[in-house]
Image (cartoon, rainbow, N blue to C red):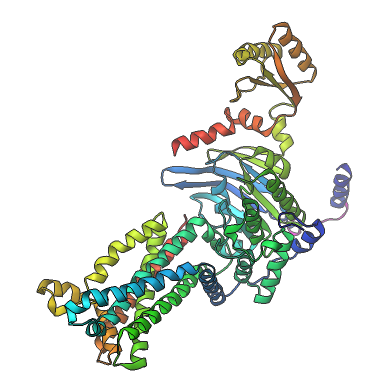
Amino acid sequence: MSADSLPSGARTHELLSSRRPAKPASALSAVATLAWRAMLKIKHVPFQLFDVTVTPIMFTLLFTYVFGGALAGTPREYIQYLLPGITVQTIIFITVYTGVGLNSDIKKGLYDRFRSLPMWQPAPLFGALAGDVFRYSFATILIIIVGLLLGFRPQGGVLGVLAAVGLVLIFCFAISWLWIIVGMLVRTPESVMTTSFVFLMPLTFMSDIFVNLETMPGWLQEVVGRNPVTLLARASRALMHGEPAAGDVLSVLIASAVIVLVAAPIAMRLYRKER
Amino acid sequence: MAVSFSLHWAGRAHIFVPPHFQVAMPHAIETAALAKSFGETKALAGVDLRIRQGSVYGLLGPNGAGKTTTIRILATLLKPTAGTATVLGLDVVKDAALVRQKVSLTGQYASVDEDLTGHENLVLVGRLLGLEWRAARKRATELLEAFGLADAAGRQVMTYSGGMRRRIDIAASLVTVPEILFLDEPTTGLDPRSRNQVWELVRRIAAEGTTVLLTTQYLDEADRLAERMAVVDHGRVIAEGTSRELKASVGSNALHVRLADPAEKDHARNLIERLLGGGVLPATTEPAEVSARLDNAAQAGQILSALAASQIEVVHFAVGSPSLDEVFLALTGRPAEDADAEKEAAA
């Protein structure tokens, strides 16, 4: 039988007479299944990992060698300061793809199928996020390996690094909800990208990722010091280098919780809303 | 027909059944004054439908008539602005979660993941519907085979042809067989061969007892598949019935005349109108065609000789039952294609 013809009627009869099971998938298994879908997408479109490999490596190399000499004497000195922060910035940039992916799925009509299935309705959002958190972890590990090769020596040891990575992932999970909102509001994946970067550029650059807070004018210190990205960068620097970080860690956790508590219900509302 | 009626009647006469025991089978789909507005735009302006269980029902109309909106409300993707809709007796707003257990939707656009293979897509849907991994994989393989996609099972859907894509889309709606299947323009953009395959599939699905509600712009498609159909225009049902009934509303026979010279069209129209005492159908976009409703076939002969006597040259002359295109034309005063153009101009 060629790939382009229908088989006998008897065969289809057998198939079409079986009915639906009484109970659809549980919320948890629906989320797990949709996370499996996200993994399959990475398998089939490895280019998806390009953003989470090339960009982080490029950023780390670029900023270490271009700014290193001027800012800290040598790149090797600078990377001790920069690496935790550049991890934060890179992963935050990658979170935008959550919104981009969601937007293109919705546009293609895939969410029509999901929404007409008898499952826990927000499952596709959580499934997509689970896949994204995997990508964030992948990128983080990569940056840290590159950093170690360039001479980054975290004084906090493995535990300190893991704690910092965990904190970054929590914060990035939280802000992903913002891009889910953007992804549902704008028309095209491209505009998700542009809209998000309008927020992200100032948010990440007006932080102490690249230079110490004390080097900035007083008024700017006020702003930058309150930016959650600064808090996150400072907390992960402290964790990686084994310095006290409890205050900043707590602030980041609170900021993450606030973002999720505000953004997630809005995202759910928009998701349930008709298109 | 007569036999079954009398048996039925006899049953009623001899065995007393208390009225409250005669549980009526709910309609597969029932809507009452269903309306939907998007801001200022009225997509639906009061749609009443009654669709029998196990039938194929067609929603027929041009782009923007309200067909897709109706289907999306019934599949719980949209909430109506006014009116009610029930699916197997379940309210689509109040009992949305239950409705979703009974229906499947194949939308106008590919509702499968193009990055995944055909097999993975069907496993995904199977899992979400509550099948175990093993059962979901088995079902996916069976369906791909049944839909003639076995060879393409391991290929990403983005590499599929239009016809294959449509089939994987419909297959995804049948991973577990729903009681009601919504197909939104299932053959739009397909070549004739693929279209025939989809038609054959719809017939087989319906033969197994699933109610199919399909929308189409192709009058021919509704004619071939649907037991009954509703013609929708500007968010309203403007006609409802079997294909035969709709055609009868235009006249039992239709005459089609194509002239050699388009300039003689008005002359021919007047002549035919005079002979029939009315009944000429509104002009189509065809420049040299005149169609008319006949009361009997004999009138055709009279018209042919009258045209010959007036020296109007005829290149094609046919008597047949009217096409649904003509039905649409007669009901709305304009051809279905014109309504499309109108919609595009407005957009």
x%, y% of residue A244? 24, 92
Residue at image location 54% in from the left, 31% down from the top: B338
Question: In terms of depth relative to the viewer, which is nearer, B20 or B249?
Answer: B249
**Quadrant (top left/top right/bottom left/bottom right) for the C terminus of chain B:** top left
Residue at image location 71% in from the left, 32% down from the top: B247
- Which quadrant of the structure image shows residue B290? top right
Looking at the image, the residue that sits furthest to the left is A218
Whether residue B135 is visible to the viewer of this picture, yes or no, is yes
**Quadrant (top left/top right/bottom left/bottom right) for the N terminus of chain B:** top right
| Residue bounds of the magenta highlight | B14-21
Question: In terms of depth relative to the viewer, which is nearer, B37 or A119?
Answer: A119
x%, y% of residue B313? 69, 12
Is B2 left, or right, of B66 in this rendering?
right
Is B1 left, or right, of A153 in this rendering?
right
- Which quadrant of the structure image shows residue B298? top right
Q: Say if B33 sits above or below B118 in the image.
A: above
Whether residue B88 is visible to the viewer of this picture, yes or no, is no
Q: Say if B155 sits above or below A149 in the image.
A: above
Q: Say if B266 sits above or below A148 in the image.
A: above
In the rendered image, residue A63 lying in the magenta stretch gets the answer: no
x%, y% of residue A167? 34, 82
In the rendered image, residue B16 lying in the magenta stretch gets the answer: yes
- Counting labels gives 0
Is A217 left, or right, of B254 in this rendering?
left
Residue at image location 69% in from the left, 34% down from the top: B246
Residue at image location 47% in from the left, 54% down from the top: A275
x%, y% of residue B18? 78, 57
